[in-house]
Image: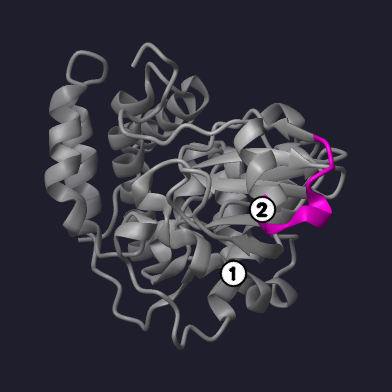
């Protein structure tokens, strides 16, 4: 895709479109400065609006269901979570040849919480564990189950088997296919989740975490939000944390062996599928995927096997 797109069929947006949408639907914001936000996010285009707001427009068809979901659930979840999350302010409608609903959110200060921007990695691991635990404690009644609009995050791990094995075959020249297959099959061998579905963010990784003054401050991009197997949110232990901070995260969250093994499988599967898709169009996300793959392989090689 030589035009710089991440998806062949994504919709074009720019500041002029945002201005026209605001003029037609929210004229009281139409004179505020608008600036495109550089982001490794794949589902939405972001435009900062003044100092306190951000406009978020789905760029691809599979993201359109996220607008309604986030407007319904984020205001309910926010008071129950220990880190800041986006606050929906207004919802726009299709217009100006833009085909989908779109949103205005509060702007959250901070930078992506990469390893280099975290002062105390162990504290960040504990803060992540607190967030995941708090999210899991929220009553899941009525929450959206795994579906297309959250990339089926929270489904049983085995539902990803065909796509994961296809990705392993695609990447056989980049990673050791035998080791990848062994690691994947080890994760599949872990007992499945037997509890009730719980809330999951669905896509915890550095691009969806913000840091201020060296400390984790916010969790953003809830497009994969839903209720399902809690192991899905453990993937952050491999796509962001080190072997040391992974142990801190697990201890703070009190994760059983089977869930930890499935979480390792989630990290591997998401990484394997994302890496070839974004390798040439989104180097930041491709690097996150590569890290997850390499960390899972390192775990596997060290004998960190799930229970049978």
Mark 2, Cα crowd under 10 Å, few <14 / some 14-19 / many 20+, is: few
Q: In this picture, which residue range is highlighted in magenta?
A: 24-33
Which residue is drawn at the image coordinates 46% and 23% (left, top)?
Answer: 282
Mark 1, Cα crowd under 10 Å, few <14 / some 14-19 / many 20+, is: some
**Among the two numbered marks 2 and 1 on one chain, the one whose residue lies closer to the N terminus:** 2
Which of these two is toward me, 38 or 207? 38
Q: CA distance from mark 2 to mark 1?
A: 21 Å
Rendering coords of residue 21 (x, y %): 63, 48
Residue 71, label in figure: 1
Rendering coords of residue 117 (x, y %): 75, 31
Which of these two is toward me, 289 or 63? 63
Residue 178, label in figure: none
Depth check, mark 2 against mark 1: the one in front is 2
Rendering coords of residue 46 (x, y %): 63, 39
Image quarter hosting the C terminus: bottom left
User: Does the rendering let one see residue 246?
Assistant: yes
Residue named by callout 2: 24
Left or right of residue 85: residue 242? left
> Which image quadrant for residue 227?
bottom left
Which of these two is toward me, 231 or 287? 287
Q: Is residue 6 magenta?
A: no
SS label for mark 2: helix
Left or right of residue 79: residue 167? left
């Amino acid at each position: 895709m030589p035009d710089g797109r991440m998806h062949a069929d994504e919709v074009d947006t720019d500041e002029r479109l945002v201005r026209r949408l605001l003029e037609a639907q929210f004229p009281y914001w139409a004179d505020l400065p608008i600036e495109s936000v550089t982001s490794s996010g794949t589902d939405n285009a972001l435009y900062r609006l003044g100092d306190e707001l951000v406009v978020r427009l789905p760029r691809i068809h599979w993201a359109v269901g996220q607008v309604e979901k986030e407007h319904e659930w984020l205001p309910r979840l926010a008071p129950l979570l220990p880190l800041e999350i986006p606050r929906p302010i207004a919802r726009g409608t299709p217009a100006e040849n833009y085909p989908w609903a779109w949103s205005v959110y509060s702007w959250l200060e901070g930078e992506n919480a990469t390893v280099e921007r975290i002062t105390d990695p162990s504290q960040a691991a504990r803060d992540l564990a607190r967030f995941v635990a708090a999210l899991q404690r929220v009553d899941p009644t009525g929450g959206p189950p795994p579906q297309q609009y959250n990339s089926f995050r929270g489904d049983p791990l085995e539902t990803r088997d065909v796509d994961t094995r296809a990705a392993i075959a695609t990447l056989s020249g980049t990673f050791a296919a035998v080791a990848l297959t062994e690691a994947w099959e080890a994760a599949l061998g872990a007992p499945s989740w037997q509890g009730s579905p719980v809330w999951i963010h669905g896509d915890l990784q550095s691009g969806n975490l913000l840091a201020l003054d060296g400390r984790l401050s916010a969790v953003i991009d809830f497009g994969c939000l839903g209720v399902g197997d809690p192991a899905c949110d453990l993937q952050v232990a491999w796509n962001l944390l080190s072997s040391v901070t992974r142990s801190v995260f697990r201890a703070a969250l009190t994760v059983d062996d089977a869930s930890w093994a499935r979480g390792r499988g989630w990290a591997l599967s998401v990484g394997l599928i994302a890496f070839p898709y974004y390798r040439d169009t989104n180097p930041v996300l491709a690097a996150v995927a590569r890290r997850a793959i390499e960390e899972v392989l390192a775990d596997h090689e060290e004998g960190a096997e799930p229970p049978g």
